[in-house]
Image (cartoon, rainbow, N blue to C red):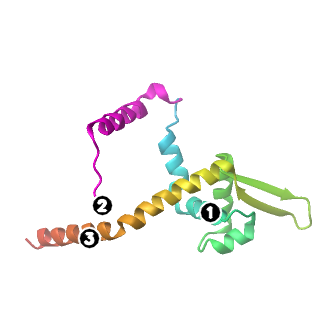
Amino acid sequence: MEVTINETQANTIQEKVKTFFDPNNHPAGFCPVKDVVDRIGDKWSLLAILNLGYGERLRFNQLKTQIEGISQRMLTVTLRSLERDGLVNRYVYAEVPPRVEYELTPMGEKLLVKVWELADWAIEYKAQILESRAAYDKKAAKKTRS
C-alpha cells in the first residue's frame, strides 16, 4: 500500500504544524502534544489504560496483577497522574478494608481508541519496519567493517 499526499494535504499539514508551534496558541508552560505524550508515553500509563480498556472497573490489586513488573508505588503514581489528567475515575468504598476501583473516563476511552489506531498502524507496517531495520543494520555493519 502506497500513501500519497497531494499538495493541498501537504499545505494543510504545514499549516497545522505552524499553528502547533506558535507559542501564542498555548498557555504558558503547556504543550498539548508533549504533555499528552509524556503521560501516555511511559509504559506504565499505557499498560494501565489498556488494562482498564476492557470497560470494567478494576480494583488496585487486579491492575497490579495484570501489569507485570509494576511496583505498588509506581501503580499508585501512575493512577494518580491519569486521574489528575481526567483519563481515569477513582471510586473509594467505605468498607473495611477500603475498596478502591478504577475505570476509564469517556475521555480515557477516546484516548484508548487512538492508541488502538496507532497499534493498528504498527501491525500494518510491522513487516516493512522490520525490513527497514534489517537493511539499515546491514548498511551500518558494512560501514563499521570498512
Please, which residue is most extreme toward the left here?
Answer: 146
Q: Nearer the viewer, residue 93 or 76?
A: 93
State the extent of the magenta-drawn residues as a range. Answer: 1-27
In space, the residues marked 1 and 2 are separated at their CA atoms by: 33 Å
Q: Give the overall secondary structure of the magenta segment.
A: helix
Q: Quadrant of residue 93?
A: bottom right
What amino acid is labelled 1 in the image? Ala
What amino acid is labelled 3 in the image? Glu
Residue sitting at x 35%, y 65%: 125
Kindly report which numbered mark, 1 or 2, lies closer to the viewer in this rendering: 2
Residue sitting at x 30%, y 35%: 8
Q: Which mark is residue 131?
A: 3
Marks 1/2 in contact by CB < 8 Å: the verdict is: no
> x and y percent of residue 114 in the render?
52, 53
The crowd level at tag 1 (other Cα within 10 Å; few <14, some 14-19, many 20+) is many
Residue at disc 1, secondary structure: helix
- Please identify the quadrant where the C terminus is shown: bottom left
Q: Is residue 23 magenta?
A: yes
**Looking at the picture, does residue 123 appear above or below residue 78?**
below
Q: Nearer the viewer, residue 39 or 124?
A: 124
Q: Is residue 68 magenta?
A: no
Mark closer to the chain start, 1 or 2: 2
What amino acid is labelled 2 in the image? Met
Q: Nearer the viewer, residue 77 or 93?
A: 93
**Looking at the picture, does residue 65 appear above or below residue 107?**
below
- Please identify the quadrant where the N terminus is shown: bottom left
Q: Is residue 65 left or right of residue 134?
A: right
Q: Would you name the residue on which mark 1 appears?
A: 48
In space, the residues marked 1 and 3 are separated at their CA atoms by: 31 Å
Marks 2/3 in contact by CB < 8 Å: the verdict is: no
Q: Would you name the residue on which mark 2 appears?
A: 1
Kindly report which numbered mark, 1 or 3, lies closer to the viewer in this rendering: 3
